[in-house]
Amino acid sequence: MNINKEILLIASLAIPLVFSILIWVVGGAKKTKPLYTVHALAAVMTSAAGLMSIQFASKGETITALNDFIFIDPVGAVFIAIISIVGLLTNLYSIKYISWELESNEIEFRDARLFFSLCHLFIFTMLLSVMSNNIVLMWVAVEATTLSSVFLVSLYRKKSSVEGGWKYIVICSIGLAFALYGTILLYGSSLRIIGNAHEAMLWTSLAMHGGELNPDVMKIVFVFFLIGYGTKAGLAPMHTWLPDAHAEGPAPASALLSAVLLKCAMAAIIRFYTVAVLSPETLAFVKTCLMSVGLFSIVIAALFILKQRDIKRMFAYSSTENLGIISVAMAFGGKLGLFAMFFHVMNHSLTKSLAFCTSGNIQHIHGTRDMSKMGGLFKTAPVTAVLLAIAIFSLVGLPPMAIFTSEFYAIMAGVQAGDYLAVAILFVGLGIVFYGLVSHFNRIAFGRKPKNIKNPGEVSFAANLPLLALAVLVCTIGIFPPEWWTALLNNAVAEILQNP
Amino acid sequence: MNMNIDMITTTSIIMAVLSFLVFETRNLKRATLLYALQTFALVAIFLILGMKYQISTLFIWSATAFVTKVVLVPWIILNLIKKTGITYEEAPFIGVYNPFLSIGMALTVALILYPVFLKFSLIKLHIPLAVSILVFMMGILGMVFRKSAIKQILSYCLFENGAHLTLALTAYNAPETVEIGILTDAIFAVVIMAALGFRFFRYFGSFDTSQAKELKG
């Protein structure tokens, strides 16, 4: 039985990696149909293996493999669920999106081949980052997410794409360099307590010895982690790469970056939080840092959302805002705060994936990302307009949408913690975001229809199908969360709070 | 024994000086060769540490670092320079004050942080540890302050070398896969940055990243 679990764990990692190579090989024939078929098959198989591998974690079990180097615990399983669900639907949507780009000569066949191959390599690196039990392997995996996705950002052969990609790799590399130093210091500190070099690098061991680690050193480690993984997660003020990278890549790549990658970076911070929980002094420091950075991210992002004209940049700033909410929920802490944090991670992923993919539809229809040149979407493409409405309504936290529920829990956790000032700032930030997003939506959906629309009319049903599935999830997961999902979240919270 | 320690200290100081020269040399080809030399100093430190403390892992580290970072990485960067024909770096941000400010900041951070790392270091050598953080910071500041894409790649290599030395001093006993993972990442990072750098040159006609102003707000 144990061997089967290990095999499942390794298979869920290996499948996207193998398919990444296979797609590259199949793409050599320069035919689109086999490329699309293998890509779709890869997406389905990766998702199936991912969801199967987390079934044990949703019962509170942790499985390990490869000499404890990789593992699936309830915390990691939350992120694997996101990668599996959002990854599947985004990858399926990308087939139609890339075919549009090929038809309009925005990209060449070799770019499409590179895109599909990198998508699966990117998913492999993200899975590895959340499955790494070894702290250095996790760092290696997070750095590899940058390397595997930089040409997704720079796929289009134009100046702005190269600029976005360059900023992405430079800024994230600088940030992650600090995270590496934090990792080395964490290892040095834990080796003294744990004694065994292998064990001292494992999150599972660190979580057990969190209370014995020197709190002063842990504070320095956390600062390094926050700069490093916080940069990758798009938290302000280290977020400057994010709007450029998210805006310049193809819409499905932006969806993967925003909906999944940012969360994988956040997972590293959550792992540290698990270690800090057993030391009240460290935890208090961690919470203060997370609260400051989180609130700052929300307010800065809210102000930038107001002045955006580019629809994808607007959604990119909304990602910074939502990662801020995740930080704030973690800072509120307690069962409710951590539950809200995990729930928000999934809700934002679903919503943002829908938002970016819908922006892909809109860009295809209008031939631009400039919102001032859009209007009358309900008349031009009613289904896309409804999808956009669902994404926006969820992002602004309207009931019964997904994000409403997790934001509500986060605010309740703040009230429960007695942190009224933070709750007030959170409300102000959310208010600005509400005004900004709704006014932009109003212009796109009901504004005057422009005279020259590139592709008037609704996009095909095949393109909209994965987005409709995302929309259904966004509308229902908040009020009718599946039982296995709630169980998984509760186990993830318990793992953080009840480590022996 | 003492001679070994003196050799380590001397080589570390040479490494620090070479880092500064990589940072400051405007001729890109020369800066790349200086980087190769600086990495060679790192390889030498690994070898001396390995001999002094009887750590066989560090011999392997020195061999892999030689092949990948003394030979392969400089070869990739020199190829990029040859392909584009751009041999000189653009003036950095804040001009003549740049080296003074950078070395000052790097030194300050190194002096503040190295006692913390020393506390947990497996090999407790003050100067090499301080140098490792200094080199790391020089690399970080190079990425921030230099405009040339090639200089930014070299800066990445610098901070990677700094981190590599810190790792050798504080965690040489870590599982071998850890070092392999970090090194593989570093090589791929240089390859990808070089490929993107070439694309940058094709669209902007130079390596001057300050020209990239399409994206704002």
Image: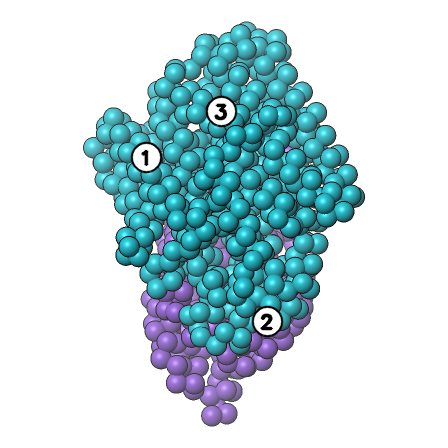
Which disc is residue A212 wearing? 2
- Give the crowd class for mark 3: few <14, some 14-19, many >=20 residues within 10 Å: many
Chain ID, purple in image: B
Query: Residue A474, position in %: x, y?
Result: 52, 28
| Quadrant occupied by the C terminus of chain B | top right
Sequence-wise first label, 1 or 2: 1
Residue B67 sits above or below residue A297 on the image: below
Sequence-wise first label, 2 or 3: 2
Chain ID, cyan in image: A
Which corner quadrant of the image does residue A415 belong to?
A: top right
Between B76 and A378, the one lying in front of the other is A378
Query: Residue A208, position in %: x, y?
Result: 52, 65
Residue B122 sits above or below residue A140 on the image: below
Residue type, label 3: Ala
Residue type, label 2: Glu
- Give the crowd class for mark 1: few <14, some 14-19, many >=20 residues within 10 Å: some
Labels 3 and 1 within one chain: yes
What residue sits right under mark 3 in the picture? A471
Labels 2 and 3 within one chain: yes
Query: Residue B215, position in %: x, y?
Result: 58, 34
Residue type, label 1: Val
The residue depicted at 40 percent of the width and 66 percent of the height is B179
Regarding residue A196, the answer to whether it shows in the image is yes
Residue A162 sits above or below residue A457 on the image: below
What residue sits right under mark 1 in the picture? A44
Sequence-wise first label, 3 or 1: 1
Query: Residue A130, position in %: x, y?
Result: 45, 51
Distance of mark 1 from mark 2, alpha carbons?
A: 44 Å
* Mark in the foreground, 1 or 2: 2
Q: Chain of mark 1?
A: A
